[in-house]
Image: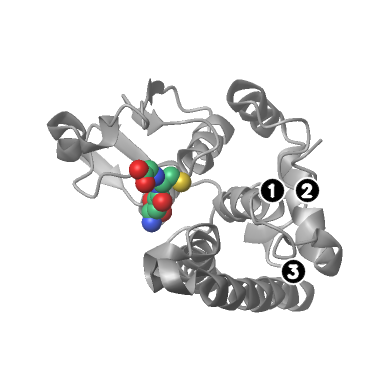
Amino acid sequence: MTLTLHHAPDFASTIVRLALEELELPHTIALADIEGGALASPDFRRVNPVGLIPALETPDGPIFETAAILLWLTERTGRLAPGPNEPDRGAFLSWLFFTSNALHTSALALFYPHRPAGEANTDAARAAAHDQIMARLGLIEAMIAAQSPRWLSVEHPGVLGYYIGILVRWLILLPPPPYGIDLAGFPNLRAVLAAHEARPAALRVAMADGLGPTPFTNPGA
Ligand SMILES: N[C@@H](CCC(=O)N[C@@H](CS)C(=O)NCC(=O)O)C(=O)O
């Protein structure tokens, strides 16, 4: 299977890179020159008409949107998530879509509050996004504590651990005070992310992308 990931280090494409590495799927990295306008080029728009990374070129054609790519990879390999006929598939899908639609979206609103709210309203938009993120991380924490799902666990690597890990990394590193998050309030999630970042595959990507030794739980290290 020939796969090409359109990527820039420490962008959302790193989530897909982590999954590809964990799955040991051979792939080519096509570095996107974002500053140089590469995502607006007609060639790239044929891969992802939305003009964002990640995008993955596959033998079946290009795929975009982080969650769609992750789901396709888990289905093709039968790894890193419950399969279509397994009993915990529904719960996994629910939290994957929640991560994509709700957590990822509110993180982007925190980093770029002018996009949903306009330049005049960035303070209010940032505060609202932060409240949403805290509530949404709280739901994930409570779900792990109550259900101990194997698809977001210390024992088994999974695409959701890598997806949430990169979002948490950015939520610790990027927002201006007082809007950064502290994982101390989310101990079950912290343990899951610590297990994911310690995996050999994650360490390889951390090295390649310059993410440091503990990219999810202590990204500033
Ligand atoms: N919903 C999209 C979001 C992807 C996204 O926001 N990509 C950012 C990088 S983290 C991007 O391509 N930014 C480049 C730009 O805005 O020019 C997904 O999950 O794939």
Amino acid carrying label 3: it is Ser
Tag 2 residue: 217
Left or right of residue 194, residue 126 in this image:
left
As measured in the structure, the alpha-carbon distance from the residue carrying label 1 to the one carrying label 2 is 11 Å
Label 1 near ligand 1 (CB < 8 Å): no
Residue 76 coordinates in the image, percent (x, y)? 38, 43
Amino acid carrying label 1: it is Leu
Quick check: 12 above or below 43?
A: below
As measured in the structure, the alpha-carbon distance from the residue carrying label 2 to the one carrying label 3 is 19 Å
Residue 15 coordinates in the image, percent (x, y)? 52, 43
Residue 94 coordinates in the image, percent (x, y)? 49, 73
In the rendered image, is residue 213 in sight? yes
Left or right of residue 6, residue 109 in this image:
right
Amino acid carrying label 2: it is Thr
Q: Earlier in the sequence, mark 1 or mark 3?
A: 3
Closer-to-camera residue (148/109): 109
Residue at image x 66%, y 46%?
157
Q: Which mark is residue 36?
A: none
Left or right of residue 142, residue 201 in this image:
left
In the rendered image, is residue 75 in sight? no
Dividing the image into 4 quarters, which one contains the N terminus?
top left
Residue at image x 59%, y 27%?
209
Tag 3 residue: 148
Quick check: 24 above or below 107?
A: above
Tag 1, which secondary structure?
helix
**Disc nearest the viewer among 2 and 3:** 2
Tag 2, which secondary structure?
loop
Q: Earlier in the sequence, mark 1 or mark 2?
A: 1
